[in-house]
Amino acid sequence: MSDTSQRTPPGIPRQTAEQSIPRRSLLAAAAAGGAALGASWLLTGCSGAGSGPGAGPAAGAVPAAAPSGRPAPGGTLRIARPPASEAETLDPASALSAYEYLGALYNRLVRIGPDGHLAPDLAESWEPDDRARTWTFRLRRGVAFHDGRPFTAADAAYTLRHILDAATASPQAAVLAPLVDPKTLRTPDPYTLVVPLKTANAEFPSLLTHYNCYVVPDGSARSIGRTGIGTGPFKLSSFTSAGPGRVTAYEDHWAGRPVLDAIDFYSVADMQARSNALLAGQVDLLSQTNLDFATARVVAASDRATIARAKDAQWYVLPMLTTEKPFTDVRVRQAMKLAYDPEHILKVALQGAGTAGWDNPVPPIDPHHIAAHPVHDPEQARHLLKRAGHERLAVDLYTSSYDPIFTPMALAYQESAARAGIRIRVKTAAADSYYTQIWMKKPLMATYWFTGRPIDQLLNQVFRGGSGYNETAWSDPAFDALLDRARAETDDARRRELYGEAQTFVIEKGGAITPMFADRLVGISRQVRGYAEYGFEFDYLGIGLKGA
């Protein structure tokens, strides 16, 4: 998956982005040596419950939750993260931002809480005018940046202008630019930000929850990528692009001192090496690493490590490119959806560790989610294909080892769709070029996204006609108009109805087959306490270690 900024978009990790750039890894050599468990052990341990050295009767079980209990104050958390570009930066607005550092160093104006609803961060409250054309944010007082400067409305306005500046090339600019003219932003006093919009949008604050929207100091564009000066619970101690780094507790954080004294970050080459480092006790947490179910069983059976689950944290999809035959025909798209059983794919590909998607990309935790959907109906699928002139439909479905779920999902879909007479030929493509050679180029392939996007951003960014992230190239003026009506609707109940209609539109006419939402299986040390995640970010303020 790639975007105009040449970095993988929201929802896709960075392992395959910019493959020609050299990688550095502090732990790679150690993970390959005697201190870590070898790849052969991992492969053996993945063969089934009870296999592998030291695996006991519970080896087949994957915990439903991280270890409970309060962490002890202090200590250093060691995080292994995927390799990144040597051009990565601490500028949160950048397409090459060092994602794992952002929640430690910065705060947003608005965040998404664990219940899926908006929650205050640097903005204590916000309200629209009666047409949802102008939004006023009341900002938190008594907040200081890491260099001692007080946070004011000037910083909030500057952050938005920085995102919208073409020189920044922020991925979030495409979301905000149709709505916000940076010249019209107003700061009537140090703790009030007024944002006039080009068009009405009753969901506008939700668009500021994206990780590109962390607040930076006024005038910091040239330095923020190196300094990392924010208002977050940790301040920067050291940072190396694509390499190691360290953040330390910010004693004067407005929400209180974090539990930990410090966090060390290491760049580790691949999932296997990261898993080995965790099992060897070299790191405490695997960031941006969704373990496959078999590896997760081995981790959970070890003495040093276990698994935390992030419920429905990723949604998996088989995009049909609607500009390519046979998927130009809506009847074929409908047949491809009716032909398979999402519950079957959930069971086979995820061992039940998730929720059936039923072709709705809006996650169940989202307050706007609708549960209604067409039922699995192979005979109706056959009927639609016959009417469309594709009675013996045979199509290629591309997958790769880029993500461990892709191929099991593809094979499960192949098996299920065969009941409707559809012949799926599963093709395996190279992982290192999958998002440059396959994604948005082949008519049918496997991919995934991270949940946690507000519904307005999800539907407009991934499904609106002409969007750079519209991976199915589906375009329907009636759907786009429906999104515009939903944005402009100030009555909450009516707006939910409109977003419900939009979801039905995607299910019935769109090109995205969405079999399931997957629980992300996160590898953590058995010493970690207070791990809580939503939207692919965990609570930096409350996480800690047992007996630190």
Image (cartoon, helix red, strand yellow):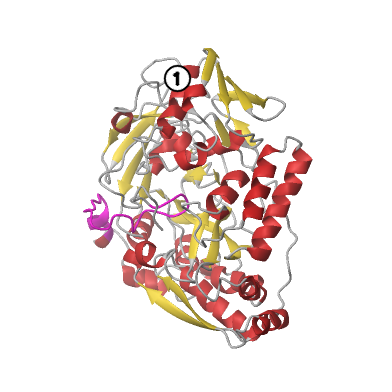
Q: Can you see residue 442? A: yes
Pick the front one: 176 or 525: 176
Q: Identify the residue under disc 1.
A: 252
Inspect the image, locate mark 1, and give the three-letter code of the amino acid beneath it.
Asp
From which residue to which does the magenta span run? 8-31
Looking at the image, residue 373 lies above or below residue 170: below
User: Residue visible at 65% across and 47% down?
Assistant: 483
**Is 357 located above or below residue 286 in the figure?**
below
Q: Which residue is rendered at x = 73% and y = 45% of the image? A: 496
In which quadrant will I find the N terminus?
bottom left
> Does residue 447 show up magenta in the picture?
no
- Tell whether 138 sits left or right of 11: right
Residue 253 seen in the current view = no
- Where residue 303 appears, as percent x and y from the top left, is 44, 58
Above or below, 403 against 289 in this view is: below
| Quarter-of-image position of residue 225 | top left
Mark 1: few, some, or many residues within 10 Å (few <14, many ≥20)? some
Look at the magenta stretch and give its main secondary structure: loop
**Where is residue 125 shown, x and y percent of the image?**
63, 24
